[in-house]
Amino acid sequence: MLLAIREHIRGWLAWIIIILIGAAFALVGLSSYMGPSGGGQVVAEVNGTDITRDQLDRAFSQRRTMYDQLFDGNLPRSLQEELRRDALEEIITDQLVREYVIERGFRISDRDLGAMIRADERFQVDGRFSPDHYRRVLSQQGLSTDRFEQMMRQQALLEQLSRVFDDTAVVTDAELQRAVALRYQRRELQYTELDYQAWLDEVEVSDEDVAAFYDENADAFRSPERVRLHYVVLDQETVRDRIEIEENELERYFDRVRGRFAEEETRWVRHILINADPDDAEARAEARELLESLRERIADGESFADLAEEYSDDRGSARRGGDLGEVERDMMVESFEDALFALEEEGALSEPVETRFGLHLIQLDRIRGGSDVTLDDVRDEVRDELIDEQMGRHLFDLRTRMEELAFDWPDSLDPVAEDLELELRESDWFTREGGDGIAQHESVVRAAFDEEVLEYGSNSDVIEVDEGRYVVLRVAEHQPAEQRALEEVQDQVREELKAERAYEKARDRARAMVEALKGGASLESLAEEAPALDVQSPGYVGRSGDLPSAVLREAFGLPRVSDGELVAGMTDLGGGRLAVIAVTGVRDGDPDSLDEESLAEERERLRRLAVEASIQDFLSQLRAEANVTIHEDRLM
């Protein structure tokens, strides 16, 4: 696979690499990889490159935030470990791919990089790239121009690699027909739902049952250990507000970067085209004579736009009065461009100009850019850029000072807050599973429950919770875990036991119904037994629709049924509900029933799956050939 990639690399920009490789950038943040990895314990090495705990914490923290919303902030420990491992694997994968790209000499020119940035709509105002807006957007994201441009260059290199996967995937007609038959298959089904609540009245739970369950699961009924913190935050915004730029510094920096702020000249142009065969001298002479007469009429006051609409053979621009819009250098054929940029005043007319398309009469409509800029023209942008350039040094100095103060005064954060003029903040209560605000960061939670901080009351080390954002904390209050008394939780235990036993009764009924269906019974007759159930008979359905997704998954996961036969199954709908399903017919999808657009979409879907499989093979081979060491004892 690697050899195939080396042989086929060409071009850039394909979508599929983002699915597997770009996921690491989306979840972790490109900037985490592009600069120095920062301090912190090494959790893994990839071909001699360290992956630090700080990197892993940032990756895990962002991924955890998404899952916390699903678990209402109570993310299970087992899932935390799984997410942390996934985050590390994505960092490793990204490092391996970046090494592959760099080692094979992929390059993005400064010109191509600049074109990518100028074309990005996020940095445009009224449809044109704005350096000021560019700086402002990056500043809001805490990025310098150098860092962002490194990120863009890295992304473009990865997209160069991606093209080979996209180019080599082929889907045969036979594969397409098989896929359509399965994807557009329809199945005839019936189903009924069983809700555990229908069996609650049949369930009894004694006091002895409650006490036994409580004794067996005592740890489940403990109030969790929790803490509340005092902490201070040092971040880029704090540093930015404190950086003072002297005028002479600003002038020296501007002299160094002046060329970047000079706007490239663009010209709005109109033309009248008269078609003429390059090999027909007579036709060209007639075209020239016509354009010269039109030039005289325009000079005498007639409208260029009106004459273009009447005479121009370029009917697209003729309808707009000959307007070709905004033109930069290297956009037009050479003779046309030379004539256009030789015009010095807005409204000026060229002599007739020959190109392979015919002869043109060109009018310079207006000019934008092209003139030099002064410091006063771009003072704010230059100041912001210089501040960004100096921020790293200032932030490093303040972080170093923060470390010294937190270490020298381990029993209080007041000296840190006062010396660095930082706000002393207070968190809400949170547990070892984390919480809201500052407690959403795994590194903060780990530090808060560290023995030195929790038991001995010391300040923590400086923690980088996000890129360029540092925290020092100490425990303000601590509440140890406590066993909740049986009397306090007995009602909760009783309800849980009743629900569990009622669900088992519902499940037993569902299993019996499935066996009866396999023995020849009808779903309608089975549903009449107490408690009575409603039967849904939607007939033939596809893989998607208004039915519960679990019902469709089970129905299409059952074995293929022959005419006159029945297959049955059951599935969990969640919330204590189950479904029993009977499938009585199957109709395969017919490629002839799809229009060309639908067939093309299906072929493209299959091609993408093939590309994804190729990428997986490529990544697996990269990993197999790499020297990767993971320090398991340092991951949590």
Image (cartoon, rainbow, N blue to C red):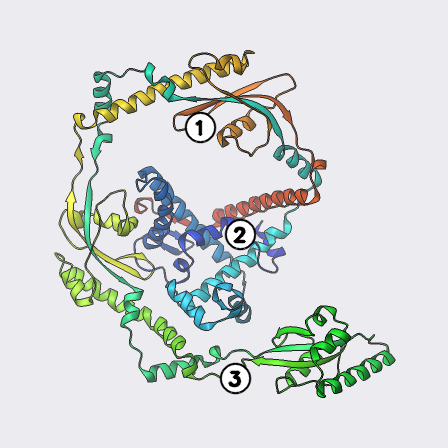
- Say which of 117 and 268 sits in front: 268
Amino acid type at circle 2 is: Ile
Q: Residue at x 52, y 27 (%)?
A: 554
Can residue 461 be seen? no
How far apart are labels 2 and 1 at the CA level? Answer: 35 Å
Residue at image mark 1: 573
Where 159 sits versus 491, above or below? below
Q: What is the total number of numbered labels drawn onto the structure image?
A: 3
How far apart are labels 3 and 1 at the CA level? Answer: 68 Å
Quadrant placement of the C terminus: top left
Residue at image mark 3: 371
Whole-percent x and y of residue 256?
Answer: 42, 81
Amino acid type at circle 3 is: Ser
Q: Secondary structure at mark 3?
A: loop
Circle 1 residues within 10 Å: few <14, some 14–19, many ≥20: some
Q: Which mark is nearer the camera, 3 or 2? A: 3
Can residue 159 be seen? yes
Q: Earlier in the sequence, mark 3 or mark 2?
A: 2
Residue at image mark 2: 17
Amino acid type at circle 1 is: Leu
User: In the image, 197: left or right of 218?
Assistant: right
